[in-house]
Each structure stands twice: as structure tokens, then as C-alpha cells.
Image: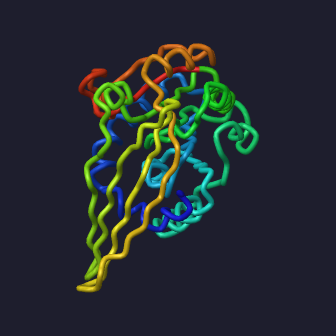
Amino acid sequence: MYDAFSSDYDRFVNWESRLAAELPFLETRLQLLSRTAPALPLKILDAACGTGRHAIALAQRGYLVAGADLSEGMISQARQNAAAAGLKIRFDTAGFGNLATSFGENQFDLLLCLGNSLPHLLSAQELADALNDFARCLRPGGELILQNRNFDAVLNRKERWMEPQSHRQGSAEWIFLRFYDFEPGGLINFNIITLKRRADAPWSQQVASTSLKPWTQADLQQALKDASFTEITSYGSMNGEPFDREKSGNLVITARR
């Protein structure tokens, strides 16, 4: 799914708006980490980095950043984006559970797992393996930041549809529609419809789907404790607002190794 979607992903996300909203929270966390870091600049691993936009923005602010994603298409796009920004950033094709093998243990001050990536792990064992892998990548005292949909609210209200996204570039236009199918076994089928047209040409359409596990706040808190993370704190967004199970759009969790 994500290899096919990688060429359109930067059209799907309004990066100027998203980074403006999220970077202040990330930099606040990094400033706190810098007080106890054994060396500066801080080292960051962006797991499930997609097209690398967070990694690039943080590298531009002077941090030592690396990125990993299971999708070769996303990694290829991330490398192109870094080159266009005049940056040399290590982007490797690596999935959850294999990060410490690829990048080494005790290497990073901060590990990011953003953009609703963790729900692609479909079992408790896969989640445990990923969180233990994250812990191995972090130095003692390092921090993990997770960002998922608030699946407590999604499951409670059976919210199927998400806000449409659109993009224009010259005479070309894209519309992205996202919705969930709730499966009997507790998984969610995540669907993206991409509509494209140029000038007055007919619309073309493409549908991509993948399975997700709707991990709740309680699920993740317990899994983090089982992986020996401490100081586990939940927020409702990357603005740092309190988490509300009924109203928050996102679940953001910070935890210390």
C-alpha cells in the first residue's frame, strides 16, 4: 500500500501546517532531554518516517537524525526530499522489531513513532517486540514519542470517515478520501481513495487498503510498562493538551527508557 502511495504522500499531507503545529512540542521535549544528555547534539531516530519530513525539519534545526520505514517507496522519497533540502540523512528500509539491528543499541536520545504507524502491528506480541526494539535503540534516560489516532473515541463512536484532503499543483488536482471498515475480529480495514485529474480530463481513481489494530490508551500504557518504560504521559495532540478519551483526535504518549 505505502509503496504505491509514496509518490502522492507529500500531496496528501499539508506539511507546512503540520510541522508548524508539531515541532514546538518536539523541541520542548528535546530541550528537556538535552539537560541530561551525555553528548550534544541530540540523536533522533524517526521510526516509520514516511517521506522524511519530520527528520528533515529536525536536521535543519541542528539535531543528528536518522529515519527508517518498512516501505522502500517511502524511503526512496525521503532520500529525494533530503537531497532537495541539501541534507545528508541516513534513511534505511527497516521495520519495527529490526531497528536496533539496523542502527545499533543505546544510540538515540529520542525515538519518534508518529502518524498512526504503530496500529499496523496487529498482535500483542508484535507490539511488545516493537516496543522492546524501541527501548534497545534508546540510551538510558532516552525518550519515546508515539502519535496515534485516538482509537478509544473511534471505537466508541464507530467513526468510519476522516476529513477529506485535497491538493492542487498547476492544472492538476488530487482528492484523498479515508475511511475505516470495522472487522468482526476487532481489526480495522483502513482504506484510502485517491482521485486525480489534470485540467478538464476525467478523474482517475485508485483504492488502497491495509489492516490496523485499534490500540487504545490502556493497551499502549500497559504494553509500555511491560517493556520497562517509565514516566508514561498521554496528551490529546502534539500541542501538549490533556488527553480526553471521548474528544481528543489523537493520542500522543511520551515515555522514558
- The residue at the point 57 percent across, 14 percent down is 225
Residue 191 lies, in percent from the top left, at: 42, 52
- Residue that sits furthest to the front in the current view: 184
Query: Foreground: 194 or 236?
Result: 194
Residue 236 lies, in percent from the top left, at: 31, 27
Query: Foreground: 9 or 39?
Result: 9
Q: Is residue 181 left or right of residue 21?
A: right
Q: How is the image coloured?
A: rainbow
The number of callouts visible is: 0
Can you see residue 112? no
- The residue at the point 33 percent across, 31 percent down is 154
Can you see residue 19? yes
Q: Is residue 179 left or right of residue 231?
A: left
- The residue at the point 65 percent across, 45 percent down is 95
Residue 162 lies, in percent from the top left, at: 29, 46
Query: Foreground: 158 or 221?
Result: 158
186 over 167 or under it: above or below: above
177 over 21 or under it: above or below: below
Viewport quadrant of the N terminus: bottom right
- The residue at the point 48 percent across, 14 percent down is 231
Q: Is residue 10 left or right of residue 210?
A: left
3 over 35 or under it: above or below: below
- Residue that sits furthest to the right in the current view: 101
Viewport quadrant of the C terminus: top right
Residue 64 lies, in percent from the top left, at: 56, 46
